[in-house]
Amino acid sequence: MKFDSNDANGILAELPEALLITALRGEIVFANRALTRLTGFSADEVIGKDVSILLPTPERRRVQVKEWLARWADDPDAESLRYLNLEAATKSGEARLVSLRVSKHEGGDEPLFLVVLRDVTAQHETVAQLRHAQLVTNRILAIGEDGVLSIDPSHRITYWNGTAERIFGYSEREVLGKPISVILPEDVASRHEAMINEFAASTSASRLMGQRGEIRGRHKDGHLIPLEASITKTTIDGELVLSAQVRDISARKAAEAAVKQSEARFRAVFEHALEAMALLAPDGRVLEINSAAAQLLPSVPMDAFFWELDWWRGDASEAQRGELKANVERCRSGEVIRARTTLEGADGADHEIDFSLLPVTAGDGEVIYIIAEGRDLT
């Protein structure tokens, strides 16, 4: 099979990548169809023109294209020059980012430069978007309320955010590359390693916060930290990466302990008080009643209103119930009620009671409980 110059020109014209050939002085002597698709210029519109026609107008004076072509072509295999990104301009004036490669042909009267161009605009935009998303993600992780850390298959720490620094006391420089056991209590380190291996081998992609229950971490100074944690796994470049979010619950545990202590103190006073006491909802419904109050009542119906309890007898009962209901309404609005009344006790005898209703308010002033207290003066 005979191969001539016409065949070569046809092949160059149909190459899928944009190609142009310039003379030593920068004049374009050949342009293929792919270059037309890329730039909008036909071959007739660029042949004989200076190669700077493909640059944006502001760049034409600043960029010494012919010097660049000569330098790139003289060292075509240099690592830094294999593919170069350059901004090109289309016929309509649209800027396109292209990656180009230059080689030099020495045949004929003078050298020729062969320039292959690839449109990498979309690729560049995608990379820029990914980089922006990564920066945003890193910023969110850096300032989030949860500590975030990642480990590689050998259980060595590969990522460590600012909150993890505050929780454990180690800076990023101190822990990167260190085994995860550095932040674990010694008595659970081996068991924790087995749990990580089990999770890595499982089909589960993550375990959410709380599914693992409370765990403990070890601070740099040696004290133990109560934590909640969630863990997830992903594969990056063929390597399994495990990431954990950890939350220091020391403050919450302390608050829970304080609430329990406060509740225990209340329970001790409430249950062992000599005075009759009842804890009411703001609407007057009975939540709890102590033993001293129970001794004044034949029975205590569940979920009853305070004024419905069997305190009274005879014709005066309805009037007394109505008065007590009105007093509860006044207390619900924040008023302290003090009164004296006569009740019939469970023993069938009348008891003179020094009676009070005390509102219990939240931080915003809203009444959340009412304490009813009665002292038997009989």
Image: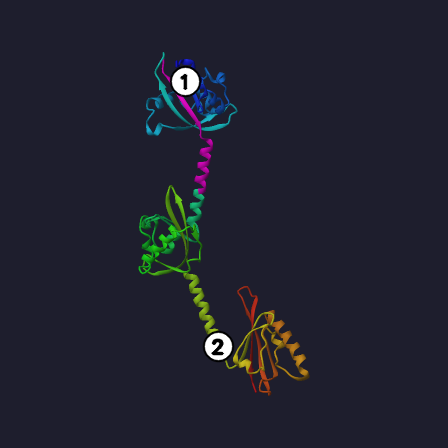
The colour scheme used to paint the residues is: rainbow
Magenta stretch contains residue 376:
no
Q: How many marks?
A: 2
* Residue 208 figure quarter: bottom left
* Residue 373 percent coordinates (x, y): 55, 78
Q: Disc 1 residue type?
A: Thr
Rendered-image quadrant of the C terminus:
bottom right
Magenta stretch contains residue 126:
yes
Element class at badge 2: helix
Q: Is residue 170 above or below residue 292?
A: above
Q: Magenta segment, which residues?
A: 110-133
In front: 115, or 64?
115
Mark positioned earlier in the residue sequence (2 or 1):
1
Rendered-image quadrant of the N terminus:
top left
* Residue 143 percent coordinates (x, y): 43, 50
* Residue 36 percent coordinates (x, y): 49, 22
Q: Identify the residue position indicated by label 1 in the image.
A: 22
Q: Identify the residue position indicated by label 2 in the image.
A: 269
Crowding at label 1, few (<14), some or many (≥20) Cα neighbours within 10 Å? many
* Residue 99 figure quarter: top left
Please give left or right for residue 304 compared with residue 90 in the image: right
